[in-house]
């Protein structure tokens, strides 16, 4: 499991390198940066390797901060369980029926991520999930294959980012490797070989999905 998490951390570093290159190419057109929390609200799913790495960073925080975050995480899980009592540890989303789940999550759309400090800075930025690192810019492979056309409305105002080759990256390879690593990790963590076993950030602070996750900045 430690080897898989190390490989996953290396994959996250590749995503960070892509984003740094995009920011260097278009510094005046990209608003996304550490400290911008415009998109950091609501509840969204993260993979179990993401949860394991997030928990490893959480465990390094001062005890007073851990205690406060644990209480907030438990409160959010309790609020979810008031409506979906079957959402129990280890808090895997694939164990729930899909009916009404998206509507329930929509109720939390305006809730800031509990990992934000009073200034809007992420307390676990170095350990943040893959989806946080990919959010904000379209995901287009070097070959021109489009994996996701979403772009934060604060970026490239009045422009068409899909036409900018400087935003392209090795996404076909990166996303394929992500799927493979997530499935292998899930097999070790849950006994099921699938890439479709997700959880939530609050749950990641309450459940250790990967004992021995590598510490240190990614």
Image (cartoon, grey):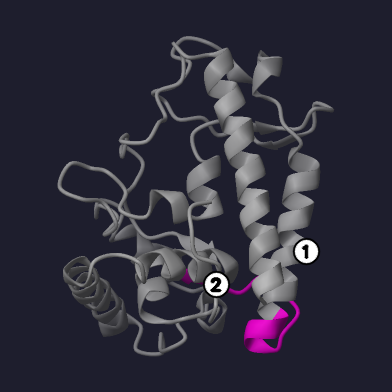
Labels 2, 1: front one: 2
Image quadrant containing the N terminus = bottom right
Above or below residue 102? Residue 211 is below
Residue 195 seen anywhere in this rendered image of the structure: no
Identified at 28% across, 61% down, the residue is: 107
**Residue 180: image tag:** 1
Query: Measuring 25% from the left and 81% from the top, which residue is drawn there?
Result: 78
Does 3 lie within the magenta span?
no
Q: Is residue 202 left or right of residue 129?
A: left
The answer to whether any part of residue 155 appears in the image is yes
Q: Residues within 10 Å of mark 1 (few under 14, many from 20)?
A: some
Question: Which residues are the magenta region?
Answer: 187-200
Q: Nearer the viewer, residue 141 or 52?
A: 52
Q: Is residue 20 left or right of residue 107?
A: right
Residue drawn where x is 51% and y is 30% of the image = 151
Task: Please say whether residue 194 is one of the residues in the magenta stretch.
Answer: yes
Q: Indicate the position of residue 65 as horizontal and vertical percent values.
A: 20, 66
Please provide percent x and percent y for residue 158.
46, 9
Q: Quadrant of residue 193?
A: bottom right
Q: Quadrant of residue 59?
A: bottom left
- Marks 2/1: CA distance? 18 Å
Q: Residue 152, percent across and down?
A: 45, 30
From the image, tell me which residue sits under label 2: 213
Q: Is residue 33 left or right of residue 70?
A: right
């Amino acid at each position: 499991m430690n080897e898989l998490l190390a490989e996953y951390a290396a994959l996250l570093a590749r995503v960070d390198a892509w984003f740094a290159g995009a920011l260097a190419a278009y510094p005046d057109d990209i608003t996304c940066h550490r400290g911008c929390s415009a998109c950091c609200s609501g509840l969204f799913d993260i993979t179990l390797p993401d949860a394991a790495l997030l928990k490893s960073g959480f465990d390094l925080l001062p005890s007073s901060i851990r205690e406060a975050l644990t209480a907030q995480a438990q409160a959010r899980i309790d609020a979810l369980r008031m409506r979906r009592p079957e959402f129990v540890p280890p808090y895997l989303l694939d164990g729930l029926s899909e009916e009404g789940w998206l509507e329930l999550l929509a109720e939390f759309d305006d809730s800031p991520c509990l990992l934000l400090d009073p200034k809007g800075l992420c307390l676990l930025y170095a350990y943040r999930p893959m989806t946080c690192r990919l959010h904000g810019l379209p995901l287009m492979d070097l070959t021109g294959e489009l994996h996701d056309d979403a772009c934060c409305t604060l970026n490239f105002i009045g422009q068409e980012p899909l036409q900018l080759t400087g935003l392209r990256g090795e996404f076909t390879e990166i996303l394929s490797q992500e799927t493979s690593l997530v499935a292998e990790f899930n097999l070790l963590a849950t006994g099921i070989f699938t890439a479709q076993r997700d959880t939530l950030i609050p749950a990641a602070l309450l459940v250790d999905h990967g004992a021995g996750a590598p510490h240190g900045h990614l």
